[in-house]
Amino acid sequence: MDGDLSDIPDDLEALRAALIVERDRRIAAEADAIAARAEAAAANAKVSSTETLIAHMKLQLEKLRREFYGTRSERTARLIEQMELQLEELEASVSEDDLAAEQAAARAGTTNVSAFTRKRPARKPFPEHLPRERVVVPGPTTCACCGSSRVSKLGEDVTETLEVIPRQWKVIQHVREKFTCRECERISQAPAPFHVIPRGWAGPSLLAMILFEKFGQHQPLNRQAERYAREGVPLSLSTLADQVGACVGVLAPIFERIQAHVFSAERIHGDDTTIPVLAKSKTDTAHIWTYVRDDRPFGGATPPAAVFYYSRDRTGLHPARHLAGYSGILQADAYGGYKQLYEEGRSPGPILEAACWAHARRKFFVLADVETSARRRASNQSPAPVFPLALEAVRKIDVLFDIERAIRGLDLEARKAARQERSVPVVAEFEAWMRAERATMSRHNDVAKAMNYMLKRWDAFTRFLDDGRICITNNAAERALRGIALGRKSWLFAGSDRGGQRAAAMYSLIVTCKLNDVDPQAWLADVLARIAEHPVQKLDELLPWNWAADQELRKLAA
């Protein structure tokens, strides 16, 4: 009927027949279009599922490769996080495409189009310690086939759904009854319970949540106050800040004991990072310093711990003050402020410098970053130069890293013996290679500068060969500072120098908990509940590693 009007029949029956044919043709065309859209939706869902599977397998492969071979580059951790974010978006997209394919197949009706069904991985069962609430769906009382009422229970199918109960607030009333004596008319009453803070109104669990959210999850108090108000509990910013300041003061004895524990080590890691601090009409750049004790790489049984300090600037006076009573081994970068610590006439004695091979490797890696250069070239930017000598240096250093991964956790003598046998020849060959190549370069050459960084401190870089206690890198301190680097984007700046000092004290407690696999919020809640009446002589019982051991004993006893 799309032709000339002269083709329209004059006979009514013929016209009716032509209209029926045209209607059937249009219905068939519409059904074909619906089927085509359903097939396209199913194909799109299949493509999305395939992309998600590929991304998932790449992520697993990268994690396994990193676990088996170790970190291949300085950016591997960030790349894994980026891959996880991409996988998250792909998972959301494939679920959306699955639903669209099912709807399109349903609209297709009786056509031969089948919906795409994605193969999903088997879900792990929910943890056994979670409480179960049974919601019983009543079964039929009569047979659906014959209508008989003679039915008996055969069994049941249980489908579990994970649910969360919104946070509940409550007010605990401590009631102390008064009694009077009929003989002497004296009034008797039980003593008031201890509060975390004198005349305090907040319970230990609430205080622990506020502290951990602020210093562990990097949520400023103003955001916490907004969330609490939406939950029907208005707490002003000044009220929350008052509790934070008081809790830091209450926990100061724990901080002092962690500090003493860290500086009693024979070897510590040291590093620092910048934090913005609010100043008059601007923000200044302050610094957070950390010193980490971690004896686990050489099989030490002493618990790991970290202590943090705040300073307004980065002068050498600060590490000199932090380490005034320390004499041992300091693993750190080549910061000039540490030089006075290594002097012979220092009291109570000179500190031995142990340089970080990861810092040295990073200088070569930047000059050998082929991927960055290729990426800049692909985006029509001028590519960064790639130096073959820098790439060769990275390969040589990675041989040492492979040896260190193999001996991690061994005792001191075993580590030293392995290094003398395997690492000494590699280091000697690397030094000879650097000195030979350096002699042919200009002092302005970037690779020469990276070599000079190591050759000028060669004694510090090779000290690990004769001492099983020393690690080849300073990564322990860098890991301790990682949370601060991530949190800067959330809290933007510290409010004052006092605020920076409070943050450093709380970071010391929280990071030490994490190093000992202790839940910081649970530890804070229990310690705040007990510390007011805890004997001073037994305060070490509240240190994270002792607290964790006590919790395990309580579980076994229960």
Image (cartoon, grey):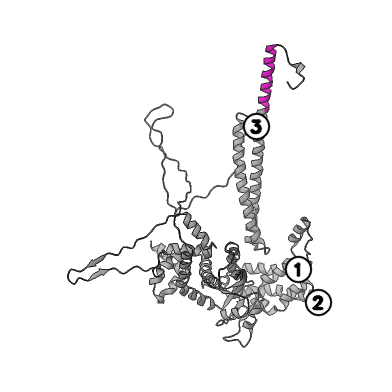
In the image, residue 61 sits, relative to residue 311, either above or below, namely above
Local SS, label 1 = helix
Q: Position of residue 29 (x, y in %)?
A: 68, 27
Question: Residue drawn at (58%, 85%), measured in percent from left and top?
Answer: 349
Magenta span of residues = 11-29
> Can you identify the residue that label 2 sits on?
439
Check residue 61 for magenta coloring.
no
Label 1: few (<14), some (14–19) or many (≥20) C-alpha neighbours in 10 Å: many
Of 359 and 426, which appears nearest the observer?
A: 359
| Alpha carbon distance from label 1 to label 3 | 60 Å
- Which residue lies under the disc numbered 3? 34
Other-residue count near label 3 (Cα within 10 Å), few / some / many at <14 / 14–19 / ≥20: many
Task: Check if residue 12 falls in the magenta segment.
Answer: yes
The x, y position of residue 377, in whole percent, is 78, 58
Residue annotated with mark 1 = 390
Query: Residue 546, percent across and down?
Result: 45, 70
